Amino acid sequence: MFPLYSTPSISTQLSFELPPLSSRLLLPSPLPCSAALDQGLQPEKRAEDQARRAPGSRCLMGSKAVILAAAVLAVLLSTPALAQKGSPPAPVSLPPAPAPAPAPHYVDLAELLSVAGPFHTFLSYLERTNVIETFQGQANDTKVGITVFVPKDSAFSALKKSTFSNLTSDQLKKLLLYHALPRFYSLAEFKNLSSLNPVDTFAGSPYTLNLTDDMGTIYVQSMWSRPKIASSVYATRPVAVYALNKVLLPMQLFSKDPPLAPAPAPAPESGASDAPSPAAAGKAGGLTGGKGDSTSAAHSTGAVGVASSLLLAAAARLILLWW
């Protein structure tokens, strides 16, 4: 066994500094273990130490330095990749989603007829027969639309009540469908439509109408009536509603002209109740006339008496003069 010598200067001589980062790829090659040990031993001990060293031994400190340098190099090379890998991906800007198309606006025919007009009679018939649902479904069709001719309440009251009460439910339904066209027509389009007479209605091909334009006034002619369009209630595609001054009366439902309602009695004029009746006036006149006659007779009788007295006085005076 050879004694081990403590060589504190060996570790000092083997320590070296790492090169800067810019040249970290060029690492200094460590000294061979034998050369490093030979520098720190005395000349007389070199032969013994060289004989004692095993051929396969290496300097541990030099190996550690190499390993440390390689580790540092690996960390430095992998830092940008790790930083890039750990950073979150940049957000992808997507184009804004298009705004949803607005829902189509539907005209509520029942509400429209309830506030316009007055069309209460026609609306009550539509709701009783459910024809209002047929018209509303057609009004919601924005491609075709609907045109409705609505008689005023005065148009219904001008006819006898039996004109409509004698109709069956199917006939009443036909009459209401007869008042609408299954397409939207503006007032300007009626001029061209008059050349296509007769025009089909919702009631079917036998129930047709003739439309005429007379100096700007549109007439809608049926068999027993020829009303005119009094006003435009609503005319925005796909719904057109026009007011009529008469009810349309087709010959398929009425074999003859329906009778009109009796004319109402004229309302009494204001102050007529204060005027005396003819009988009372005559009676009052008779009383007044009798009183006047008696007064005039009394005046005439008085005048005759005065004249007679004067004549008698004059005669007596003449007699006295003759004597």
Image: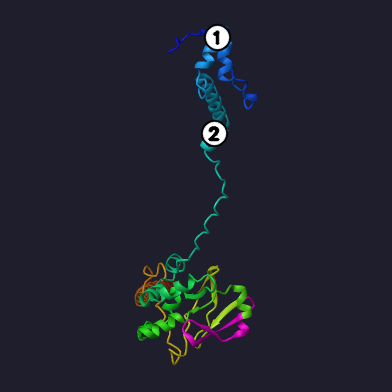
Magenta-drawn stretch contains 184: no
Image: 65 above or below 41: below
Q: Examine the image and state in which quarter residue 316 appears.
A: bottom left
Residue for badge 1: 41
Distance from Cα at disc 2 to Cα at disc 1? 49 Å
Residue for badge 2: 83
Residue at x 63% of width, y 27% of height = 25
Name the amino acid type tagged 1. Leu
Q: How many numbered discs?
A: 2
Residue 226 % position (x, y): 53, 83
Of 36 and 292, the residue lying toward us = 36
Residue 216 % position (x, y): 63, 75
Left or right of residue 210, residue 172 in this image: left
**From the viewer's perspective, is the residue at label 2 or at label 1 nearer?**
1
Is residue 228 among what the camera can see? yes
Left or right of residue 259, residue 37 in this image: right
Pointer 1: residues within 10 angstroms few (<14), some, or many (20+)? Answer: some
Residue at x 51% of width, y 25% of height = 56
The part of the chain drawn in magenta is 193-216
Pointer 2: residues within 10 angstroms few (<14), some, or many (20+)? Answer: few
Q: Earlier in the sequence, mark 2 or mark 1?
A: 1
Disc 2 on helix, strand or loop?
helix
Name the amino acid type tagged 2. Ala
Of 16 and 184, the residue lying toward us = 16
